[in-house]
Structure formats: C-alpha cells, structure tokens
Amino acid sequence: MAYFSPDLATQVVVDAGPNCAGAVLAQCDQKDIRHIVAYASRALTDVESRYSQTVREALAVVWTCEHFHLYLYGSQFTVIFDHQRLEVIYNSPTSRTSARIER
C-alpha cells in the first residue's frame, strides 16, 4: 500500500455483487505502475440486494465516491468498473436513465 499523493493520477476501481460492494483507491506513478492507497467494502442491505445489477453497480460508484470523499473532492479521478451498461449511461449525456441512477 502507498500513501496518497494529490499530484498523481487517481483511479477508483468499483465492483458490486449480489450482496456486497467493494472499491479500491489507487494511483499511478510516473512509470504508470498502479499503487493501492486504500480498500473499502460494505454489505448491501436486504432491499439493496434486490436491485438490478445495473443499479447495484451505480450504487457502488456513488457509495465509493462518498466513502473516499477526502481523497477525491476537488480533484479529477477515473472510475473503473466492469459493467458495460453503466459505461453507456455515464458516457452518453442523451441516454434516459431512472432517477435512482441519476443520483
């Protein structure tokens, strides 16, 4: 694990499963080697575990940004996730999404 540096490129890797959400805060050094700064995970509530996979992944992104707020606030960072539908939703400003995901 490494110390956080505001001068390095920051990445947040996010994933959600049926019952949990997890995230990794990482930074790439000058040689493009990724160093882990912090890990985070949480169990989903009974209601959250009934959400669709797309909504669970979006929930994980929002929760991760709130959890790592002290590191991320006011700086640019990259969110990395493995759910293709979220990529379309976040990268297409004209796509129609539900209010829950737009949060």
Image (cartoon, rainbow, N blue to C red):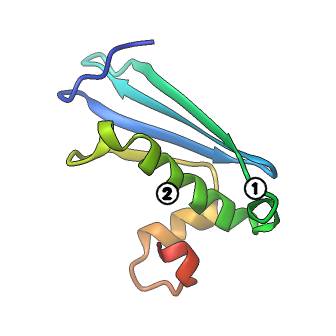
Q: Residue 36: which disc?
A: none
Identify residue type, mark 2. Answer: Val
**Gap between marks 1 and 2, in whole Å?**
15 Å
Q: Position of residue 22 (x, y in %)?
A: 63, 39
Above or below 3: residue 60:
below
How many marks can you see?
Answer: 2
Q: Residue at x 57, y 77 (%)?
A: 100
Q: Residue 45: which disc?
A: 1
Residue 21 lies left or right of residue 34; in this view the side is right
Residue where numbered disc 2 is placed: 62
Q: Secondary structure at mark 2?
A: helix
Q: Position of residue 34 (x, y in %)?
A: 42, 21
Q: Which quadrant, please, contains the N terminus?
A: top left
Who is closer to the viewer here, 85 or 46? Answer: 46
Residue 11 lies left or right of residue 22; in this view the side is left
Packing grade of label 1 (10 A; few <14, some 14-19, many >=20) is few
Above or below 4: residue 17:
below
Labels 1 and 2: the sequence-earlier one:
1
Q: Position of residue 5 (x, y in %)?
A: 24, 23
Q: Residue at x 48, y 76 (%)?
A: 102
Who is closer to the viewer here, 90 or 100? Answer: 100
